[in-house]
Image (tube, rainbow, N blue to C red):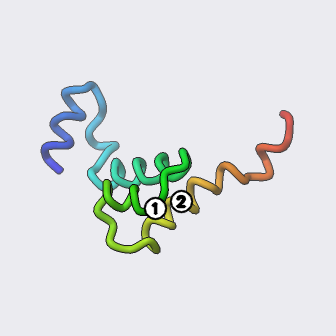
Amino acid sequence: AILIKKYLSSAGFDPKKYSGHSLRSGFATVAAGSGADEKSIMTMTGHKTTQMVRRYIKESNLFKNNALSKIDL
């Protein structure tokens, strides 16, 4: 965690806004939203069960299938 915060700070990001977990979660969510299969996501994130990975996939699909996206505002 300290190493991640060090590199975030070096890159100009506020390390208080990020953690190892948020980066892992963000990767899994974006990968699922981009069509990556569960097994390949699990290989990268170290998740042991598809149940946990599916939580992120569900969050990703929440925005894709949102009824609000069908309204032209």
Of circles 2 and 1, the one toward us is 1
| Element class at badge 2 | helix
Q: Residues within 10 Å of mark 2 (few under 14, many from 20)?
A: many
| Residue 5 picture quarter | top left
How far apart marks 2 and 1 lie (CA) works out to 9 Å
Which residue is identified by label 2?
57
Q: Residue 53: image x %, image y %?
A: 44, 65
**Residue 68, numbered label:** none
Position of residue 24 in the picture relative to residue 60 (left or right): left
Residue type at mark 2 is: Ile
Q: Residue 11: image x %, image y %?
A: 25, 26
Residue found at x 39% / y 56%: 40
| Element class at badge 1 | helix
Residue type at mark 1 is: Glu
Q: Residue 67: image x %, image y %?
A: 80, 52
Position of residue 37 in the picture relative to residue 22 (left or right): right
Residue found at x 85% / y 41%: 71
Position of residue 28 in the picture relative to residue 68 (left or right): left
| Residue 73 picture quarter | top right
Which residue is identified by label 1?
38
Task: Kindly indicate whether the residue at mark 1 contacts the one at mark 2 (C-beta within 8 angstroms).
Answer: yes
Q: Residue 19: image x %, image y %?
A: 28, 49
Task: Specify which label sits upstream in the sequence, 2 or 1.
Answer: 1
Is 50 drawn above or below residue 21 in the view shown? Answer: below
Position of residue 55 in the picture relative to residue 71 (left or right): left
